[in-house]
């Protein structure tokens, strides 16, 4: 269960029932995120591929043809054929710092992840 959450640009921050924090980045630049995945994995691609071609090929190579998880990246081919990508973070506090810097939120480097995430969610939601 989600206690609270906030959206900031491409980022979603969630405080879970156990008060742990999860950060997702849902990419606006899907093709750019597919390039990140390909380069991370050494997957050769044609820069002329459309986003749909690129995403479908990655899902076939690393998943079931419709979905793939490659490291912290998740790629999905939607029913419409559109591609959606998002990323989770192993270093949650690093992601919170990244978001804070983008929005100008001042934080105390002594905060733990739970406190930092909770305060950032509250700040974003006003």
Image (cartoon, helix red, strand yellow):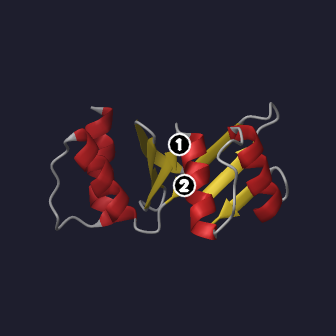
Q: Are marks 1 and 2 in contact (CB under 8 Å)?
A: yes
Residue 71's place in the image compared with 119, above or below, is: below
Residue 19 in percent (x, y) is at 41, 59
Tag 2 secondary structure: strand
Q: Residue at x 60, y 59 (%)?
A: 37
Identify residue for label 1: 27
Whether residue 126 sits left or right of residue 84 in the image: it is left
Question: Camera-side residue: 84 or 120?
Answer: 84
Q: In this orientation, does residue 123 appear?
A: yes
Q: Position of residue 107 (x, y in %)?
A: 17, 54
Observer-nearest of 117 and 86: 86
Residue located at (79% from left, 52% from top): 57
Q: Is residue 67 visible?
A: no
Q: Is residue 67 above or below residue 80?
A: below
Q: Residues within 10 Å of mark 1 (few under 14, many from 20)?
A: some
Q: Nearer the viewer, residue 30 or 87?
A: 30
88 vs 45, left or right, is left
Point out which mark residue 67 bears: none
Q: In the rendered image, which residue does mark 2 sit on?
A: 87
Query: Position of 97 compared to 40: left or right?
Result: left
């Amino acid at each position: 269960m989600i206690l609270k959450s906030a959206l900031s640009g491409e980022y979603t921050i969630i405080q879970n029932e156990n008060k742990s924090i999860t950060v997702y980045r849902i990419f606006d630049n899907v093709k750019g995120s597919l390039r990140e995945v390909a380069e991370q994995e050494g997957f050769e691609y044609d820069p002329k591929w459309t986003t749909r071609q690129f995403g479908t090929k990655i899902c076939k190579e690393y998943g079931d043809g419709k979905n793939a998880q490659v490291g912290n990246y998740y790629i999905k081919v939607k029913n419409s054929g559109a591609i959606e990508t998002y990323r989770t973070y192993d270093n949650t506090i690093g992601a919170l710092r990244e978001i804070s810097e983008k929005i100008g939120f001042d934080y105390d480097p002594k905060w733990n992840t739970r406190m930092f995430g909770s305060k950032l969610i509250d700040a974003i939601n006003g």
